[in-house]
Amino acid sequence: MKNNIISLTLLLVLSCNSQDKRPLVGKTEYQQKLNASYKDASTSPLKKKDLKNFKGLDFFPVDSSFMVTATLIRTENAPTFQMATSTDRKPLYKEYGVLKFNLKGKDLELTIYQSQDDLRDEKYKNYLFLPFTDNTSGNESYGGGRYMDVMTTDIKDNNTILLNFNNTYNPYCAYNDRYSCPLVPRKNHLDIEVKAGVQVFEKH
């Protein structure tokens, strides 16, 4: 009987501990990681009052039709330029190339950029920056547009790359105006509703 009581106590303790470690919120690994970073006060862009009530970001339903193969046309001898931001900050970028793809039956293109500051950072030197707006911007998604990270290492030998619009995110400015965020160039507007990725954030 004593052993049974000890076993039952251990089960209750283990059960309580497992409940404390709640599973990460999100339908995909990408969503879970993004939610985890926003929930962590050391990495979150959220204001304190929003962080206190944070349960997870809102996403459009995951939709495989928003995963498309794009052809990259590299921009040769692209000049360095100062990209406009939501503040006076002017980070240095270069056009890396133009991505051409078909989405929902429409032929579209986006210009992709390379941060010149990131080139000096071992952690981010392979990152490319893909900002865009679409016909959900300002309604179901953030008015300032969304971003997608693309890796140079994911570009195939035939200059094609998979774009997954389910893995898009908002600029930090969507959550907190103390951040400085690159503005989406006008030419990177997609005349289509991209109902994939993160949705507009409801501030408290």
Image: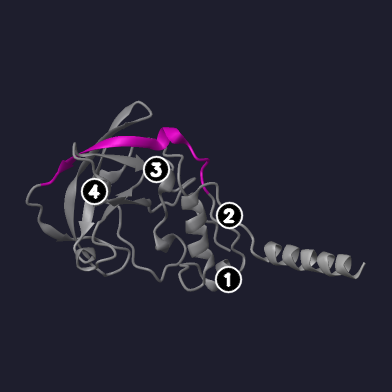
Between discs 3 and 4, the one toward the N terminus: 4
Front position among marks 1 and 3:
3
Q: Would you say the residues marked 3 and 4 are in contact, meaning their CB atoms lie under 8 Å apart?
A: no
Separation of marks 4 and 1 at Cα, in angstroms: 35 Å
Is residue 66 located in the magenta-colored stretch of the structure?
Answer: yes
Classify mark 2: residues with Cα within 10 Å, few (<14), some (14-19) or many (20+): some
| Camera-side residue of 176 and 5 | 5
Quadrant the N terminus occupies: bottom right
Q: Which residue is mark 4?
A: 112
Reading the image, the residue beneath label 3 is 165
Gap between marks 2 and 3 measured at Cα: 19 Å
- Badge 3 amino acid: Phe
- In terms of secondary structure, where does tag 2 sit? loop
Mark 1 or 3 closer to N-term? 1
Under mark 2, the amino acid is: Val
Question: Along the horizontal axis of the image, is 114 left or right of 4?
Answer: left
Query: Residue 133 at x, y = what percent?
Result: 35, 46
Give the residue at mark 1: 49
Q: Amino acid at mark 1?
A: Lys
Q: Amino acid at mark 4?
A: Ile
As measured in the structure, the alpha-carbon distance from the residue carrying label 1 to the one carrying label 3 is 29 Å
Is residue 137 visible in this depiction of the protein? no
Q: Which residues are magenta?
A: 59-75
SS at mark 4?
strand
Camera-nearest residue between 69 and 8? 8
| Residue at mark 2 | 25
